[in-house]
Image: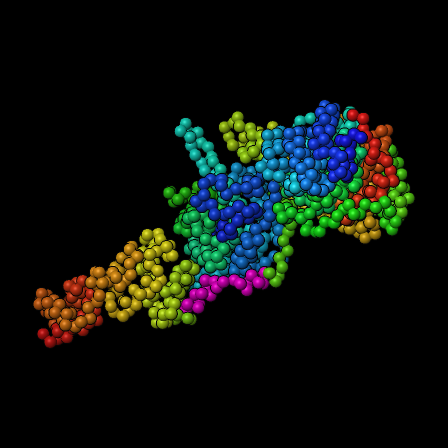
Amino acid sequence: MNYETIIGLEVHAQLLTKSKMFCRCSTDYASAPPNTHVCPVCLGMPGVLPTINQQAVEFTVMTALALNCTISDYTRFDRKNYPYPDLMKGYQISQSYAPFGHHGWLTIEANGEKKRVGIDNVHLEEDVAKLIHRTSPGGESYSLVDVNRAGVPLMEIVGEPDLRSPEEARQYLMKLRSILQYLGVSTANMEEGSFRCDANISIRPQDSTDLLAKVEVKNMNSFKAVYRALEYEAERQRKRAAEGKKLAQETRGWVEERGITVAQRSKEYAHDYRYFPEPDLAPLVLNREWVEAIRSKLPELPEARRDRFVAEYNLPLYDANLLTSSILMADYFEACMRGAPQKSAKPVANWIIGEFSRLLNATNTGINDSKVGPVALFDLVQLIHEGSISSTSGKSVLEEMFHTGKSADDIIKAQGLSQISDTEAIEREVMAVIRNNAQAVADYKAGKKQSLKFLVGQVMRATRGRANPTVVNELLEKKLEEG
Amino acid sequence: MIINQLTIHEAHEQLKARQLSSVELTKACLERINQTEPKVHALVTVTDELALKQAQKADQLIARGNTHPLTGIPVIIKDNMCTKGIPTTCSSKMLQNFIPPYDATVVEKLNNCGAVIMGKANMDEFAMGSSTEHSAFFPTHNPWDPSRVPGGSSGGSAVAVAADETIYALGSDTGGSIRQPAGFCSVTGMKPTYGRVSRYGLVAFASSLDQIGPLTKDVADCAIVLNAIAGFDNRDSTSVPEPTPDYTQYLTADLSGLVIGVPKEYFVQGMQKEVETAMQAAINRLEELGAKVDWEVSLPSTPYALAAYYIIAPSEASANLARYDGVKYGFSFTDTDSMWEALEKTRQFGFGDEVKRRIMLGTHALSAGYYDAWYLKAQKVRTLIRREFDQAFEKYDVLVTPTSPTVPFKIGEKLDDPLQMYLSDVCTLPINIAGLPAISIPAGFGNGLPIGMQIIGKPFSEETILKVAYAYEQATEWHKRKPQV
């Protein structure tokens, strides 16, 4: 039997506010010693009360608008009750009954086609403390609690189960991350934990509406992990179904090192969170004009920017898509292009998408943290375009720039890499190659035209790549005809 | 003159005239505490050293011409309001060793007025109770008859005022916890409109019902204290940014033009005859003072208030008390190998029976499958009750009822019968459900035991309530009677 895969993702994103969700503590805890960004409110001490961070509300409404959600006129917070040492009050202030945004969507591209993925709701809650598990020298296990993270605003985006493959899930996550980064509401960095994803995955027989057991997969800490975990889980469920075994409704954890998911807890023992309206916070009535003002202030989003790149820079859709998938890369591209003619766009895009991205990825460097600024990169592309150096040399020059931060000009001068377009100099090398490769010359004359490529290669080698390949070709053909 | 018997306004006049110093006043109260505490057990903590220091500071302030009516005046704070550096126990084993690193907003406000904090008052554990018998430490005794309860949960605060251990006190009221003990001890106690006084630093019992208010020796004092503690607080988003008038400006003896309603549902079955008689006499007196009285008001949803209250309050409490897990502060059961067992045992041994009963009630009412039938239904009843009050206040300026259907009962009498205990608040808890302001003032005695009259107003009409209360008080002598301790 053929099974269809059904996936829905729940994403938590930490918001880039200065202070926490319900108190004035700073959210900038990344390098702070444990329990230094705390106060009676985020510690959940007796008698304290929460107050709402307006910036977080604005960020959430922005996101909900960008995700085409309907914004609730009346919203409020609810208490989600469960005991755990990372939860200071024994309940989390979240939203269940009246989230800020609902019924939205975002578009992904799957198999070359556009697809709309539903967003059930966008809501706001607070992050929990961090537990650090230790073992004493005596072998006793214990846990430490760092409350710095507790109370950081956390936005949850609950997706509809509209995704049909791990690849679609990956596309969805990348799109969502890119939107959050464009909005400036979150760093949306999965590895750093500011962007977290839980997945609901199940299978169903093709053309049926009966889902088999729904499985929640947790503990995926990168885009790649999400993709691998979903691939594994879909396959696991298919195998079990094929063997006629029952699938359990359960929560499973992804184990990165082993590349498998393992059962964590069965849904029969699921928590009853006993949601009820948070009595410490008055309901919020969102003013329509305020919401419209936020809508009018929304920045250009990835799709709009991509379309503009196609129109304004005459870039192919593929290039524009890649460049705009990250706001930083798109900004970098536009910084390169500042004051440059439109015809430079394609070569600049090629170098950013190609060699520069390769270097960034290989060294795990952020585009803004690299030593090659947009002006330096543009200068390099110009030198290649003007024929001062070959594109082969360009690659090594960029690598040198990337590691040392020197300008393209300086490197070219220092290494004597500038391209030789001087016909006389090239002619000397051409004659030498003809003299030393009698067999290839004979083959060429006998009609084996591929030999020309070999001979061009020999000239390039002799000039260490500096000879202008067009000139080499012309000269070789001419000399061979003559000789 | 017995100086610890002075009211705020009397003491203030003498302090201002330099006929009395705050240190003398404070010492008189501390002496009285030494004398009466062994009999009434109203206080959990006495901060005598701090009080004397604050009194000295207050005397300096007064010498420099500071004339705030609360400067140098001793106060007792119910032990569920956080006091920086002073234990705040909620009369619970759970918080027996808890010393807050912060002040409640009301405490901060009193300190800014130059108040003298003398100590913390006993209460029913986490404010859950109507007799102060549910304190984890000791029951408080009624100074009018030590074999009887003082009411609760602010029993310690009411007794401290009634026994003249202090000039005034602060209490908190979730279902009658200021008014019922005020009635039982023959003092004045007000629960302001929900949102009138900041709850920041008040250890939460039921967040949508809790409100802090004054317990005083007369109505004028009540107005003075309300002036000091009322107002919007940006740390409490349920506090209301309404302007606060000077409540002392409304204290006049004339009630002409005022329309008073008497809701018949508050004269319930099981009401004691002497309470009914006293109420009739009191309301007649209001009529004599110029008010028009309608004896036939009906608020038909009143009988459902108790049930709704005992769903809403425990539901909120079940979440509010979840933070006491033994990890961060307070009592901690550590003699175990497992985190979950530590959590369970901490709560098993840290909380008393009444608290556990309410946590279980609330947990159940919020559980999947029961939420709609219990919690949501109770919220609907709440809306109905509110609406009935709104309608009544279109016709009446205030409503008048007894504070409690009975005079103070015997210690131990209702301890094993929670439902009977809950009925003691049947006249007060609908007011919390509707978020309204109400006062209890002395309105007579039955067999030597105090009887309180409750005056209820529309939201943010504390001045009207105070006016009616003041007119009645000035026409009667009940508030001047003192118990023999």
Relative height, residue B231 to residue B350 (above, below): below
Viewer-closest of A303 and A152:
A152
Which quarter of the rendering shows the C terminus of chain A? bottom left
Residue A457's place in the image compared with B354, above or below, is below
Q: Residue at x 53, y 28 (%)?
A: B334
Q: Residue at x 18, y 71 (%)?
A: A422
- Percent across and percent down for residue A435 are 8, 67
- Residue shown at the point (76%, 50%) measured from the top left: B387
Q: Is residue A117 magenta?
A: no
Query: In the visual, does A44 lie left or right of A480?
Result: right
Question: Against B406, is A196 above or below?
Answer: below
**Residue A136 x/y as whole percent:** 42, 30
Q: Was residue A307 drawn as part of the magenta stretch in this picture? A: yes
Q: In the figure, residue B443 lies in which quadrant? A: top right
Q: Which residues are magenta?
A: A291-310
Judge left or right: residue B138 versus residue A476: right
Q: Can you say whether B141 is above or below A89 in the image?
A: above
Residue A156 vs residue B245: left or right? left
In this orientation, which residue lies closer to the viewer: B415 or B456? B456
